[in-house]
Amino acid sequence: QVQLAESGGGLVQAGGSLRLSCRDSRRTFSNNGVAWFRQAPGKEREFVAVIDWRGGNPRYADSVKGRFTITRDYGGNTVYLQMDNLEPEDTAVYSCAVSRSSVGSTNVSDYRYWGQGTQVTVSS
């Protein structure tokens, strides 16, 4: 059973940076694609970024391209989301998710395991 733990959220001013971490405490997602999604109040969950099992082929939502970077550590046990030049529109609960495949996708239905989420708030 995969157990995900996100950390790194918080309150930051517009233009600032945060780095989110998603750790798999049982080391079971090293062969799977991992993604970040976010959900703002009153809105549907949306895709943010995804990375494959080897730490390659990163893909991003257009809204974060050029500002966010997804990586994973060498052992594949932790996935990071570096968020720079944050905007108030980035305010949401950010959750990591483990894909059923080694590649991952932008489709929320492809994800089997989800973390509890971490709040990111960007003030103007």
Image: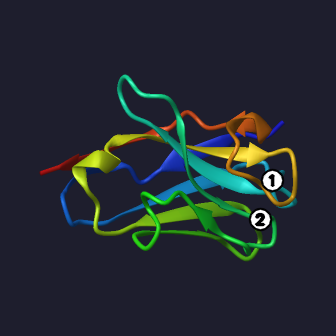
Along the viewing direction, whichever of 88 and 81 lies nearer the viewer: 88
Q: Quadrant of the N terminus?
A: top right
Residue type, mark 1 in image: Phe
Count of numbered marks: 2
Q: Residue at x 37, y 22 (%)?
A: 42
Neighbours of disc 1 within 10 Å: few (<14), some (14-19), many (20+) = many
Neighbours of disc 2 within 10 Å: few (<14), some (14-19), many (20+) = many
The spot of residue 89 in percent (x, y) is 29, 47
Q: Could you say which disc has been placed on residue 15 in the image? A: none
Along the viewing direction, whichever of 54 and 45 lies nearer the viewer: 45
Residue type, mark 2 in image: Asp
The spot of residue 81 in percent (x, y) is 51, 62
Q: Which residue lies under the disc numbered 2?
A: 52
> Mark 1 or 2 closer to N-term?
1
Along the viewing direction, whichever of 9 and 111 lies nearer the viewer: 111
Q: Residue furthest front?
A: 62
Q: Residue at x 63, y 62 (%)?
A: 79
Q: Residue at x 87, y 60 (%)?
A: 31
Mark 2 lies on a secondary structure that is loop
The spot of residue 29 in percent (x, y) is 81, 53
Asked which colour scheme the image uses, the reply is rainbow
Q: Is residue 1 left or right of residue 62?
A: right
Q: Which residue lies under the disc numbered 1?
A: 29
The spot of residue 40 in percent (x, y) is 38, 33
Q: Is residue 12 above or below residue 19?
A: above
Q: Residue at x 47, y 50 (%)?
A: 7
Q: Quadrant of residue 75?
A: bottom right
Q: Residue furthest top?
A: 42
Along the viewing direction, whichever of 9 and 99 lies nearer the viewer: 99
Q: Is residue 107 left or right of residue 69?
A: right
